[in-house]
Amino acid sequence: LTSAAVVTNGRARLSPEPAPKRRDAIAKSLRVLLISLFHPELVRGGAQQACYELFCGLKERTDIEPYLLASIDESAPALFKSGARITGFDRRPSEFLFLSRDYDYLWHKATNPLLIESFIEFLELVQPEVIHFHHFLTLGVDLISIARRTLPEARIIFTFHEFLAVCAADGQMVRRADKSLCDEASSVRCHQCFPEHAPEFFFLKEAWMKKHLSAVDAFTAPSRFMIDLYAKWGIDRAKLHHIANGQADHARGAPPLEQRERRNRFGFFGQLVDNKGVYIILEAVDHLRTAGFRDFVVEINGDNLRYASEARRKEIEAFLEREAQLPPQERNVVMNGSYHISQLASRMARVDWCIVPSVWWESFGLVISEAWMFKRPVIASNIGGMKERITDGVDGLHFTVGDPRALAEVMKRAATEEGLCDQLVAGIKPPMSRDEMAAQFFEMYRI
Amino acid sequence: MAEDHVLKILNESTPHKNRPGARRDGGAKQTAGEHRAGGAKSSAARVDALWVSRTGDVFMIGCADDRARELSQIRLVGRNCSQTLERGELGRWLTSDQKEAGEKYLAGVWAIASLGSEAAKEERWRVEFVFAEGADVAVEVAGRPCAAQELNERLSEFLATFSRGDCKTPERSERLDRLLKSGRAEPPPFPRHNIEAIVLAEEGGVFIVGWIDDTLDPLSEIRLSGPGWRVAFTGDALGRTAREDVQSSIKSIKRHAFGFWGFASASGFKRSVDKCRIDLTTKAGALQRLEASFGIVDGLELRNLVLGFLGSCRYLGNPYLEAIASVAKSIGRNVIDLNTRITRDIVAHPYIERFGRRRAALKGSIVVCLYGKPEYLFLQNALFAGGAGIDDYEFVYVSNSPELAERLLRDARICTRTHDLDLTLVLLPGNAGFGAANNVAVKHARSDRVLIVNPDVFPYDPDWAAKHSTIVDELPNAQTQLFGAPLYYDDGSLMHAGLYFDADVGISLVDGEFKAETYLRVEHFAKGAPPMSSRFLHSRPVPGVTGAFISCDRKWFEKLGGFSEDYVFGHYEDADLCLRSLESGVAPWIHDVKLWHLEGKGSTRPPTLEGAMTVNRWFFNKQWAAKVAPSLLGQRPNHPLLRAEVDAESRRSVQPRKPDRAFDRSTRDIPAPGFSESHYAEIVFGGEEAP
């Protein structure tokens, strides 16, 4: 949709246009609109990747006609066409961009009436029978109510990717003062994290969120512990469903883990932001070297260090600088930088283990699935989605969250204990496939 | 009408020093009710000016044409003192009219009298001109208090203007000699002082602040004279404040309120020059004349400046009581006057836009006054929408924050698309305060019931609206004319289940003496009580309900005259409305339609708001303190209307009482000479030229 296609006077009611008639074979299919936080092609992140995997999975089915509406923000200014509020994307059929602007991050609300009008018109044009929100960030939680009002018969699904509806601290449920994990939001507890906001603000924000979420027919979350937390927060447990994030098998055709004498190559895959905990690995490396253990390597794959806190960023940069000063043979840490999903196989080929040292709950941990695709056991923090998915000693190893000494011990054991890696590799079950995920959602769409 | 002014306005009646005898507009004829004491036709007589010094000397200038019948006496008659001046005690002078006509007859008359200290207390005088053959004329005139030194100056200036033969001194001139002699005596030294700021708004008023060490000789008056205007503050009309900086600087041992400030509300000041003359006078007659620059602001800025200053003042005694005392004499009324004029201007120019589907049959209009926080519009829309019965209600939002106008219009548009409530937005071009804004919003409501709802009030139960409608439909009329509801804090405890009144006696130690004052306190029933405390939740009459939620029959609201608009920004309007309702025979009730009220964010109040609170507190107490006690005090008042069993219909015998206006507004915006009362000592326009 371009500006020419939208109503310029938002006060005039749009007369809904009938949905485009499709050929009989397709007309029987279920029209599903997926609404995503960002397009993974433009901004990488777990939520958008999961949504896009689903979109691709649904596209492969003949009984579903999927559409994707992905938000972008001002980080991609070239894609903001003058006067447009919703546009297509790079000639991809059925993929559209929601050009988010003037977003109210405090209340998670769209504030531009013309954007709302465009969204309403988009719904009226597409006439989805299912509207599947994968987020409200950059879109507006009130879009759920607007969708309900615009298409009262549509089934609305919402997938939680973290706790943004509950937690103002980026939905991470990590307390801001001491970085401890939080398992329950309340007006006063949230006020303690944000002293600039009175408890009443959080009371209202909860009411505001729940009001709009009440228009949702069913919720999904990729982890069971998330379901427990949302049920505790007040979402009807009967509406909450567990569907794991599925992915295409990027390991297809990749050679199996090569036989090696020692399994001492560790890999980190992900963003270099605080909550992903890469600094825990670097501290563990220091501990290991101090203890005289140097026969290992850690390969770091990822970027977005600029989004880390200043203190952590400086800490990581200083470590890497020191590391670069060492003779090559003495270096234990290698910085590989960012990677595209197509490079995953080559990056995985360089490691025996994956480390997921996140210091927040990790709602799912796509990187665990990716490691498992390549039959790499995972060493992970013993909390949340990581704890739920990885069984210690069966398909991976746990360490105490946030404790670099504990990680150092596990790394040393992993690198030195003969047969451990192969034993854990044997315990790895294939992660949820994209098709399987699409099938599970299809069942949910049809209820 | 106001009755507590320190002094009344005097009109300019001083003969121009260069044109003695010139009759001035606003002279005695405006303030004096001339009448004939005798039956015989007499010659014309008038009084142009009558000064009274603190020491009891009187200097009168007037005119009495006695060519037909000789003037034999003039009697000066006050309430508690009088004096007869024989013909030999009267001076004569040539009026400008006669001079221009080329006449030599001295029609003007002047006199000096000494009546003692009682004379200084007199406000009005009766001047009786006694002519031969009993053709007397009596003139009522307001005396102009002045210091002894000023009286001397006036007299000297008067005498100095005449050419030889144009003025004749009294044959008996003892008093004149004494006065002129005393005038040459060294005046008492003027205390140390400083005028720190004078700020003026052409259509607002004038504000002065400074300090003076008047521990020994109290400040009695400050006169400001500008181009075509003059304002005088008596000492009592000034607020006095503690000034530790002054105390320390002048090394004074005695604790004393060295600071002073005054504010007079008026329109029509000229700003052709930015300087004015200041005359300060002490009780002992010391006079200090200064010239000072003044700042110019608009009326709104002036109000906020005054309130901000008031809110940041420090006092020697109990700050609560001393702050009220400082505004009680004069400043409070002047602030209310200026604020009312500002408010009137604001509410006269609203911008109104309606949104959403118009409902045909409405059970109520939810009126919400927004200020500073635009998010409450979309939050209330979201949280009220969808509840059972809400489609029977419209929402009228009135905004006191013009800077939010665009945002509110945008949000209202989005709300319409999201919830489709029946919504009207009334945007005001300024902050009109709670009372005036709600009153103007009610005018745009379309139903027979208005629900005054704070923006931070939200439904406790989804079917809140349906419950409210049931109450209005099914309960006796007398119980629903005006009612409130139990309100809850976000923490789940009760916040409100009706208002009651209590009285506090405050003690303040000033100048070594205790002052005790009693002030009304407005309290909430059930504040912080467990949520389901049944004693607070059942339907019952109460002394008042909070303005956070008032459901009121529209006709009754209008008969009561709506909210009082005299409270600055907002506070006490709810209690004031309820008390007027009670006084008019309808008790407020509480009915169980629970709501959340997220009152109290713990935010600090800016000094401007603090100052407004002081004025409101003073005004509310002035209006109601005497009426509330004793039948309405306490949690169990014995007022007959608050007994639930009283026959509802018997309550309706009294005519609704509209809010008392702080003063007669029809005269308040008249800057010209001639209005009879004000709230500072004196204000005169069209007077002397700028110094």
Image: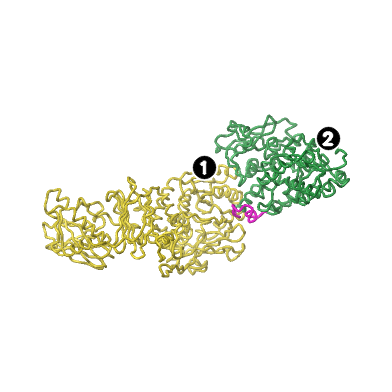
Chain containing mark 1 = B
Where residue B102 sits in the image (x, y, percent)? 12, 48
**Quarter placement of the N terminus of chain B:** bottom left
Q: Which chain is green?
A: A
Give the class, few, some or many, for how many residues have Cα within 10 Å of label 1's Cα (few <14, many ≥20).
few
In the depicted structure, whether residue B620 falls above or below residue B423: below
Colour in which the image shows chain B: yellow
Horizontal placement of A30 versus B463: left or right?
right
Where residue A353 sits in the image (x, y, percent)? 81, 43
In the depicted structure, whether residue B642 falls above or below residue A310: below
Which of the 4 image quadrants contains residue B4? bottom left
Secondary structure type for disc 2: loop
Horizontal placement of B150 versus B398: left or right?
left
Q: Which residue is mark 1?
A: B406
Q: Which residues are magenta?
A: A185-200
Q: Amino acid at mark 2?
A: Ala
Where residue A110 sits in the image (x, y, percent)? 60, 42
Nearer the camera: disc 2 or disc 1: 2
Q: Which mark is residue B633?
A: none
Q: Which residue is mark 2?
A: A254
B445 or B186: nearer the viewer: B186
Q: Is residue A203 shown in magenta?
A: no
Q: Is residue A187 shown in magenta?
A: yes
Which of the 4 image quadrants contains residue B253? bottom left
Let me know if marks 2 and 1 both belong to one chain.
no
Where residue B119 sits in the image (x, y, percent)? 25, 66
Give the class, few, some or many, for how many residues have Cα within 10 Å of label 2's Cα (few <14, many ≥20).
few
Colour scheme of the picture: by chain
Chain containing mark 2 = A
Secondary structure type for disc 1: helix
Q: Amino acid at mark 1?
A: Glu
Measure the alpha-carbon separation of dots 2 and 1.
58 Å
